[in-house]
């Protein structure tokens, strides 16, 4: 096997996502042939080199698994937590495979979260180039005005950069209505910040769909394995959208 970047090897071995694998390297928790590696550009050969994480030798993944989990509120969507709060991995009772979350869902948000040990799948799904739409049901304090709805759809200034166009649809009226929100990006706390920018606090936030994968009837804390066709459809959607974006002509000024 040719040499590859260390973070890619860790992801392919089911250790963590590439982003999390980079953190493990920077923290000095990865060794190659007995030498601690802290540089992200380091390459290695999975077949020839002895690669360890926290002293445990990496071995090739024997079988790729893909999981849809209904993450409850007050559960951390990471593989481990310094504060020792409940993580999504604690909910996967009886699972023999080592998996990690594909992206994240806020601590006080619930709903659909994907987990896998397939590094290529995880990297493709969370890549900004993929533009995979994610759908949420959001309960907020107070209904948005038509003007506020337009601002939400066209983009909100967030950390010096306007958010991408978003889908917004009222699905339940009331003093504290529910909206369906569709995003093609996933910046930290994005939906909560967008509503807060317009003067509305989010009371509940639930993710119900990622691309072609739906939360369905999963109860909080329950999980299921994705069918092969679900994985295939999601990968095709991600690669198609990334290809379209790559071919898009530059906008004239």
Image: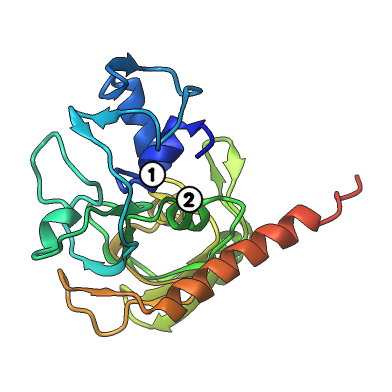
**Total marks in image:** 2
| Residue 70 coordinates in the image, percent (x, y) | 24, 70
| Residue that appears at 31% across and 73% down | 176
Label 2 sits on residue:
123
For mark 2, does the 10 Å Cα neighbourhood hold few (<14), some (14 to 19), or many (20 or more) residues?
A: some
| Residue 65 coordinates in the image, percent (x, y) | 31, 65
Label 1 sits on residue:
11
**Left or right of 167 in this view: 36:** left
Q: Is residue 78 above or below residue 39?
A: below
Residue lying farthest to the right in this orientation: 252
**Who is closer to the viewer here, 251 or 116?**
116
SS class, disc 1: helix
SS class, disc 2: helix
| Residue that appears at 35% across and 25% down | 25
Residue 65 circle label: none
**Left or right of 244 in this view: 204:** left
């Amino acid at each position: 096997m040719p040499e590859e970047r260390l973070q890619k090897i860790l992801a392919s071995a089911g250790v963590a996502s590439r982003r999390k694998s980079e953190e493990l390297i920077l923290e000095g928790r990865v060794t190659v042939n007995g030498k601690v590696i802290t540089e992200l550009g380091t390459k290695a050969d999975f077949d020839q080199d002895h690669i360890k994480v926290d002293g445990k030798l990496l071995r090739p993944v024997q079988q790729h698994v893909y999981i849809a989990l209904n993450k409850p509120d007050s559960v951390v969507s990471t593989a481990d937590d310094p504060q020792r709060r409940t993580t999504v991995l604690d909910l996967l009772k009886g699972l023999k495979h080592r998996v990690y979350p594909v992206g994240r869902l806020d601590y006080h948000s619930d709903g659909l979260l994907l987990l896998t040990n397939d590094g290529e799948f995880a990297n493709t799904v969370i890549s900004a180039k993929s533009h995979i739409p994610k759908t949420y049901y959001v309960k907020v304090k107070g209904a948005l005005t038509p003007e506020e709805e337009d601002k939400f759809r066209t983009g909100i200034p967030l950390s010096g950069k306007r958010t991408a166009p978003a889908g917004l649809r009222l699905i339940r009226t009331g003093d504290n209505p529910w909206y369906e929100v569709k995003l093609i990006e996933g910046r930290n706390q994005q939906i909560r910040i967008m509503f807060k920018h317009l003067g509305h606090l989010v009371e509940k936030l639930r993710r119900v769909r990622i691309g072609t994968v739906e939360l369905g009837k999963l109860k909080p804390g329950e999980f299921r394995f994705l069918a092969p066709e679900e994985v295939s459809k999601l990968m095709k959607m991600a690669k198609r959208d990334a290809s379209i974006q790559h071919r898009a002509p530059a906008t004239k000024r």
